[in-house]
Image (cartoon, rainbow, N blue to C red):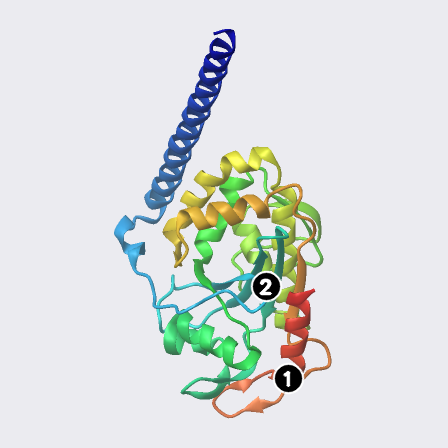
Amino acid sequence: MRADKHQHKKKRRWTSILLVFLLLVGAWAGYAYFQFKQGVNQSLKKINKDSTDNEEVYTFEGQKDQYGDTNILLLGSDARGKEKSRADTIMIAHYNEDKGTFKLTSIMRDSYLEIPGHGKHKINSAFALGGPELMRQTIKQNFDIDLQYYSIVDFQGFAQLIDEAFPNGVEINVEKKMSANIDVTLEPGLQRLNGTQLLGYVRFRHDAVGDFGRVERQQKVVKAIGDQLSGFQTITKLPKLIGVVTPYVKTNMDTSDMLFMAKDFFSDKRGNVATLRIPVEDSFTEPRIKGEGAVLDIDVEKNKDALHQFISQ
């Protein structure tokens, strides 16, 4: 009799614990949804666009790569994904769920590569010719790496996200004075940049190193964002941050995918974000091609080997 009574009390205790847990999960889900919608509405008011405009999703036949990584094609565009625009920024985020690690590859937009069905062109034209799916096919054909997701980010969305996530700006050491064609003037030195200023920083390329310097700055900023926006406090902000950027993004990722990966990216346990630039050093020439202008004519095999070694380590 006494044993039955003890078992009954134990069962009631676990039932109460389970009920409290379910209530907490439900409360968090409700809070996350409310914050997400608040972020979406905040951005929609600023861009004066109907929320249904972002519902278009391109065809994208992606999958995980042979190493088990989830690779996300990140494309930066001034034209919010219009097919006739070229991709201004081309990156691949590599996420390994088992290790909780992130790596980042930047492909320089002037890389002169074979585009399936179109011959050789600068890789950024693949987006104009066939959207993210043709870009995926181009990367697969040249580098033998599969991409599972794509995300086309309007640059204005990047600025809005930075202002929401960093009310006091992102700390960056600006290496030189920058002003040409970026709509802001940046002075050299360690400082905090708001969204518009940071966008100008990652887009600047009117100096002796041109696109090479710009790619280096883009990777530097991704690392700075991850390092300066980490920990539990950030996790609670994620639903709203994703909501803020959603109206500016076209992607085949759903909100739960983004939340799942973002929580690992902003975790204190993430570690450093390793980076790679394609083309790698001593693997390209810079000829001028009729109809294309100055290009980066790359050694495809050498760069493919470097990319696979980078991902698999």
Query: Is the residue 49 above or below the residue 75 in the image?
Result: above
Query: Is the residue 58 above or below the residue 281 in the image?
Result: above
Side of 189 where 31 appears, left or right: left
In percent of width and height, residue 59 lies at: 34, 68
Residue type highlighted by circle 1: Glu
Number of numbered discs present?
A: 2
- Residue drawn at 51 percent across, 76 percent down: 140
Residue at numbered disc 1: 301
Residue at numbered disc 2: 204
In percent of width and height, residue 238 lies at: 49, 40
Kindly give the residue lying farthest to the bottom in the view shown: 290
Q: Which quadrant does the C terminus fall into?
A: bottom right
Side of 33 where 219 appears, left or right: right
Kindly give the residue lying farthest to the top in the view shown: 2
Mark 1 neighbour density, 10 Å: few (under 14) some (14–19) many (20 or more): few
- Residue drawn at 47 percent across, 42 percent down: 241
Query: Is the residue 292 above or below the residue 266 in the image?
Result: below
Residue type highlighted by circle 2: Phe
In percent of width and height, residue 95 lies at: 57, 57
Mark 2 neighbour density, 10 Å: few (under 14) some (14–19) many (20 or more): many
Work out whether residue 282 or residue 57 is closer to the camera in this orientation and state it.
57
Label 1's element?
helix
CA gap between label 1 and label 2 equals 30 Å
Q: Nearer the viewer, mark 1 or mark 2?
A: 1
Side of 273 where 150 appears, left or right: left
The disc at residue 52 is: none
- Residue drawn at 35 percent across, 71 percent down: 83
